Amino acid sequence: LLPPLLDAVSYVHNKGFVHSRVKPSNILAVANTLKLSADQITPVSETGSVRRRDVYDAPETAAGVLTPASDVWSLGATLIAAITQNVSLIEQPAGKGSLPESIPEPYRAIVRDCLQLDPKRRTSVPQLQARAAGSQEEPGAAQQERRAEGQPEEPEGLRLERQVRGQEPRGGAGAAPK
C-alpha cells in the first residue's frame, strides 16, 4: 500500500496540486494497481474553503490551508487506519508515546513523522519515498528527536516495500521465519 500511494501523491504534488482528501475511501486497489480518486485535487497556490474536518484531515485544513504537508498528515492517518483498523486512534492527542505499541516499527516512526502538529516539522513525500526504498536520507522530525534524546535509531534499510508485499518478515533481514 505505502510505496504506490506515495508515488500517486508525489505525482499530484509534482504537477502543482494537493490531493486534500487522502483517506482509505479514496484509495482503490485493483490487482497490482493502486488508484487515488481525484475529486478534491486543489492547486498548491490556492487556499481551500473552510470546511468541516474529518479524522484524515490535517489540523490546518480547518482554516482552509492546503499544502503538501496536509497530504502527509493524511498519509499518516491512512497508515494508522490500514494497520489498526481503528480510526479513533487518529483523534487522540498527538505527543510522545501516544501511538499504540500495536503499530510495528518502522511504520510507527513514519506515522509519528507524518502526524506532527506543525506542518513544517512533518516529513515530506520524497523523504517517505526514500524510506520506503530503504534509504535513510534526511530523517523526519520524530527521528531527529529520537537522536537528540539518545534513543536508538531505526534499523538501516527499512525495507518497507518488501514488508508491505509480504516478501520479508516484519523483523527485517535475518529475522526468524514464523
Image: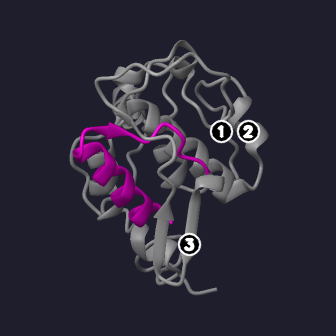
**Magenta run includes residue 7:** yes
Answer yes or no: do the residues labelled 2 and 1 have beta carbons within 8 Å? Answer: yes
Task: Give the residues in magenta.
Answer: 1-23
The amino acid pointed to by label 1 is Leu
The C terminus: image quadrant:
bottom right
Which residue extends farthest top?
63
Looking at the picture, tell me which residue is in the foreground, 96 or 78. Answer: 78
Q: Are marks 3 and 1 in contact (CB under 8 Å)?
A: no
Mark yes or no: residue 113 visible.
no
Label 3 SS: strand
Q: Residue at x 48, y 36 (%)?
A: 20
Name the residue type under label 3: Ala
Residue beneath disc 3: 29
Q: Is residue 138 left or right of residue 38?
A: left
Q: Earlier in the sequence, mark 2 or mark 1?
A: 2
Q: Pick the residue in front: 11 or 55.
A: 11
Q: Quadrant of residue 67?
A: top left
x, y percent for residue 64:
50, 17
SS state under label 1: loop
Label 2 vs label 1, nearer the camera: 2
Residue 108 visible to the viewer: yes
Residue at numbered disc 1: 99
Q: Nearer the viewer, residue 116 or 22?
A: 22
Q: How is the image coloured?
A: one colour
Q: In whole angstroms, how far apart are the C-alphas of marks 3 and 1?
A: 27 Å
Tell me the CA gap for discs 3 and 2: 24 Å
Q: Residue at x 31, y 55 (%)?
A: 129
